[in-house]
Image (cartoon, helix red, strand yellow):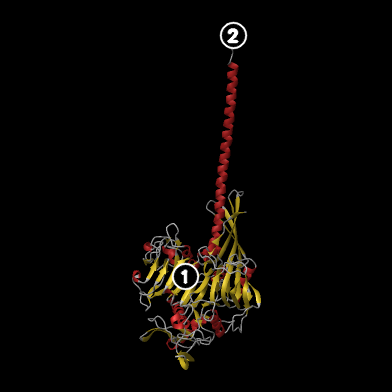
């Protein structure tokens, strides 16, 4: 028989090994459980200390924003913000340290240091939180900025307070129109047009087409001032099908009105809105969401107007320029203009010069400048601040902005050039990415064309200029090859003066309604009377005898009807109070005489043999917080080469627009420029916060 093998030792060893393995696993599980409990406890502490530190940051928000505006009834301007912040004990350069204990017994200590900058107040904030154990701490740092919100007006092809003469024979498209007909596979971006106060049209003969949306907040009126109750019947068409976000065909559609007085009816992507909400109403009734994009409430000056006086004072100008030149303003890198013909202080010019007296215009320069790119293009880059007036025409290359402290006068065609070197080349507008970018912004006004000739005057006579008051002038006409001259009472004004009286009336009524309102009035030139149009039920006047004058120590009728009688009589003391807080802008140039200015325009257009008859051409963004005046006279009545037409490829944005283009204006909105000119509205300040970071 064979021997039997004894396996008891093997079984014992296996059992011992198994028990050892179990012991190891049990040990690992025990250690893991302890570690998990520790990690969980650490995670809880980390979360608690993080939330406590964030609570400190939120306390800082309360201290530098909500507490500042408690019980403040006025407009939230930067000047008001700085004043109230100082009254609470946080002066420029000072710091404050605040502590608090939270319900879970965690504590935080938050430090806020104030640093004033041009157009903004900067806060350096640190918050350190500590848990009751005394060991768990966390420090967060964050930067706060209080400054004006970014002006969104350049999302519009046309944006103004009151649109009247401009809205007849008008065509508005986006730049996509140069790419060919729209389709569902190749749609056009919609263009946007808005009037904040009044949209006035000739209901039956407007002949207006907008490839997009029209927005109104105030009155929608016929030319006689009567309200239009049914927008579907007017002679204005849109290419936007209601409910569509862009343009997919070229079928003209009647306006489909949406009344935003009813929140539920104010849906996006419509082609006509009225009673479109203000910022305050959006916050209160629309949950902070704009129904179809933001529509600004006001037109801020191109530079921060910290004290809210509607002027850019020396300190405000110098601060903004210095910030740009030092590279501290990413919105406005320091710029330069070269090429073309550049003339500093062109006083005394009687003709366009063949050569300039400077070779470049650096940002921050003082004095007025004539910029002529008609023979060789003007080359611009960055932001060029000019402390004076600007007179400009010709071709433009590069990407840049001009911000003038005075007025800007466009004295001829102003178009992009896409050539290289000395070779000139027209741009392909179907390929906008390859084109220049250009913006003109005036602290004063922008004037395009011959704004000086009186109604019925001679557009080729540089001396035929609206005198600014009723006077006697000599008028000469050719009849049967003979020239006859006679003296004529100049009871009539220019179109420009008629528009001035309307703008001044609107400002006067606002000043009457709000004793804290700072009105802005216009004059043709310093020393002229402050005229306004007093008649409430007539579109406008063109005779000086019909205008009212606002002057000190004199009572005046602010509003009356055509049939007579005064609805609102201002006493002398009321007039004085309004004038004491008012600001006045003059249209007259400081670097040239008005006669020389008109002569340059005549040489540029009427007497320029190289210029064929046709529409005035303007490329780029035009912006003024005050007024833009533009005139393209008709061929029949005035013999104008412009034939009453204007072709604008960019955008037209101004508080007041006095536009006379009887042959029609066509605007192609250059949406590339929507964020090109960045303007902060210091009359509507906001709090901005950066991302927090661990320290």
Q: Position of residue 323 (x, y in %)?
A: 62, 68
Mark 1 to mark 2 CA distance (whole Å): 112 Å
State the residue in front, 60 or 311: 311
Give the x, y percent position of residue 305.
55, 73
Label 2 Cα crowd, 10 Å radius (few <14 / some 14-19 / many 20+): few
Pick the residue in front: 347 or 60.
347
Task: Let me know if residue 360 appears in the view.
Answer: yes
Viewport quadrant of the N terminus: top right
Query: Can you identify the residue that label 1 sits on?
Result: 667
Secondary element at image label 1? strand
Q: Tag count in the figure?
A: 2
Quarter-of-image position of residue 442? bottom right
Residue 597 figure quarter: bottom right
Q: Indicate the quadrant containing the C terminus: top left, top right, bottom left or bottom right.
A: bottom right
Q: Nearer the viewer, mark 1 or mark 2?
A: 1
Residue 219, numbered label:
none
Instruction: Determine the image quadrant of residue 112.
Output: bottom right
**How far from the left and from the top, in percent, is residue 6?**
59, 13
Tag of residue 3: 2
Question: Badge 1: how crowded within 10 Å, few (<14), some, or many (20+)?
Answer: many
**Residue 316 seen:** no
Question: What is the residue that sits farthest to the front in this orientation?
Answer: 481
N-term mark: 1 or 2: 2
Decide if residue 512 is on the left or right side of residue 117: left
User: Which residue is located at x 59 percent, y 63 percent?
Assistant: 123
Image-based side of 510 in relation to 33, left or right:
left
Mark 2, secondary structure of its residue: loop
């Amino acid at each position: 028989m064979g021997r039997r093998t004894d396996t008891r030792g093997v079984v014992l060893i296996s059992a011992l090994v198994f028990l050892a393995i179990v012991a190891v696993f049990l040990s690992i599980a025990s250690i893991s459980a302890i570690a998990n409990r520790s990690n969980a406890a650490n995670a809880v502490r980390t979360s608690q200390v993080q939330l406590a530190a964030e609570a400190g940051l939120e306390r800082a928000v309360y201290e530098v924003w909500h507490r500042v505006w408690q019980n403040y009834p006025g407009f939230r301007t930067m000047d008001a913000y700085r004043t109230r912040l100082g009254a609470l004990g946080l002066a420029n350069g000072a710091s404050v340290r605040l502590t608090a204990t939270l319900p879970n017994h965690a504590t935080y200590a938050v430090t806020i240091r104030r640093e004033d900058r041009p157009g903004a107040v900067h806060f350096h904030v640190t918050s350190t939180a500590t848990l009751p154990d005394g060991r768990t701490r966390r420090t967060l740092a964050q930067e706060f900025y209080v400054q004006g919100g970014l002006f969104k007006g350049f999302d519009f092809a046309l944006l103004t307070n009151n649109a009247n003469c401009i809205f007849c024979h008008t065509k508005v498209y986006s730049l996509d129109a140069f790419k060919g007909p729209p389709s569902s596979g190749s749609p056009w971006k919609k263009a946007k047009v808005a009037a904040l106060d009044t949209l006035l049209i000739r209901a039956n003969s407007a002949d207006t087409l907008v490839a997009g949306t029209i927005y109104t907040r105030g009155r929608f009126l016929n030319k006689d001032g009567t309200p239009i109750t049914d927008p579907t019947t007017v002679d204005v068409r849109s290419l936007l099908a209601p409910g569509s976000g862009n343009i997919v065909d070229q079928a003209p559609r009647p306006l489909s009105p949406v009344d935003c007085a009813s929140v539920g009816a104010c849906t996006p992507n419509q082609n006509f809105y009225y009673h479109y909400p203000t910022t305050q109403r959006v916050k209160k009734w629309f949950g902070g969401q704009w129904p179809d994009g933001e529509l600004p409430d006001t037109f801020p000056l191109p530079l921060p107007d910290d004290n809210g006086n509607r002027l850019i004072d020396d300190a405000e100008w110098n601060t903004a320029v210095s910030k740009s030149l030092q590279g501290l303003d990413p919105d406005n890198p320091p710029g330069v203009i070269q090429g073309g013909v550049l003339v500093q202080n062109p006083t005394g010019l009687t003709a366009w010069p063949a050569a300039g007296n400077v070779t470049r215009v650096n940002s921050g320069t003082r004095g007025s400048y004539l910029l002529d790119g008609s023979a060789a293009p003007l080359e611009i880059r960055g932001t060029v601040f000019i402390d004076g007036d600007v007179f400009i025409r010709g071709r433009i290359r590069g990407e840049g902005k001009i911000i003038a402290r005075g007025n800007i006068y466009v004295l001829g065609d102003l178009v992009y050039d896409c050539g290289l070197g000395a070779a000139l080349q027209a741009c392909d507008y179907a390929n906008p990415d390859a084109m220049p970018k250009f913006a003109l912004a005036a602290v004063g006004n922008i004037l395009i064309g011959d704004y000086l000739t009186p109604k019925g005057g001679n557009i080729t006579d540089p001396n035929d200029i609206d005198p600014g008051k009723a006077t006697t002038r000599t008028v000469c006409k050719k009849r049967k090859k003979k020239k006859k001259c006679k003296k004529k009472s100049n009871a009539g004004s220019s179109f420009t003066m008629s528009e001035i009286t309307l703008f001044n009336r609107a400002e006067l009524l606002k000043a009457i309604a709000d004793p804290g309102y700072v009105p802005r009035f216009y004059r043709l030139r310093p020393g002229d009377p402050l005229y306004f149009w007093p008649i409430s039920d007539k579109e406008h006047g063109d005779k000086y005898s019909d205008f009212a004058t606002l002057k000190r120590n004199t009572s005046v009728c602010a509003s009356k009807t055509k049939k007579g009688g005064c609805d609102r009589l201002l006493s002398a003391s009321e007039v004085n109070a309004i004038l004491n807080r008012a600001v006045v802008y003059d249209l007259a140039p400081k670097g040239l005489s008005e006669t020389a200015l008109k002569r340059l325009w005549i040489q540029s257009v009427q007497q320029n043999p190289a210029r064929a008859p046709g529409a005035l051409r303007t490329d780029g963004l035009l912006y003024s917080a005050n007024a833009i005046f533009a005139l393209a006279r008709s061929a029949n009545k005035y013999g104008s080469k412009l034939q009453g037409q204007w072709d604008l490829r960019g955008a037209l944005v101004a508080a007041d627009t006095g536009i006379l283009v009887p042959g029609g204006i066509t605007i192609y909105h250059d949406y590339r420029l929507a964020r090109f000119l960045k303007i902060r509205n210091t009359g509507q300040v906001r709090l901005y916060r950066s991302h927090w970071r661990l320290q």
